[in-house]
Amino acid sequence: MKDYFKINTRTIVATGIGAALFTLLFMYVKVPSPIPETSFQTAYGLSSFFAALFGPIAGALISFIGHALSDAVQYGSPWWSWVIASGVSGLIFGFAYKRTKVEEGEFKGKDILTFNLIQVIGNVVAWVVVAPVLDILIYQEPVNLVFTQGITAAIMNSFSAGIFGTLLLVAYAATQTKKGSLSKK
């Protein structure tokens, strides 16, 4: 379990690149929903991809920093309840790290199912629990509004991570040398 929380140069570099890409996707590559202040965010597909490759710390920091920077640039200050929820989602996405064989050139069937179960759990915890509760506690937002927004965000972000995260991981796995594929002649 301690491998999940190991920080090294690779994790730091991935976090920097991931946070920058997350910020750009979060700001510019999204589709608004009919629910106020919620959008289909492609950025969660990217953060789930990075989290599955680099672990929970990278996933949490990428989502937290990327969301905070995006809010600060677009609105002048972060909406902390949702920034924290983004970090929580990335943290939970990172539990797919070491549970799939993507680094060994395999990402099929069981690995795809494992990754998607974890990312759905991460999205539900972040958007149906953390974001609405913090909206109520920090900003005194109306209960029915924040839970409607949270459920909508959980569904849309699960689709984003499920579609884009899975496709990115399948493509990445295809670039890796499969374990045992090299033979000595």
Image: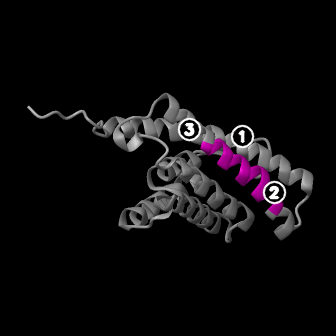
| Residue 171 placement, left or right of 109 | left
Name the residue beneath numbered marker 3: 114
x 74%, y 42%: residue: 33
The image quadrant where one finds the C terminus is: top left
Counting from the top left corner in percent of width and height, residue 37 is at 76, 52
Amino acid under disc 3 = Thr
**Mark 2: which secondary structure?**
helix
Res 90 quadrant in image: bottom right
x 47%, y 57%: residue: 18
Amino acid under disc 2 = Pro
**Mark 3: which secondary structure?**
helix
Mark 3, mark 1: which one is toward the viewer? 3
Query: Which label sits on residue 44?
Result: none
Name the residue beneath numbered marker 1: 155
x 87%, y 52%: residue: 145
Query: Which label sits on residue 132?
Result: 2
Instruction: Return the residue found at the far top.
Output: 109
Distance, label 3 to label 1, CA atoms, is: 18 Å
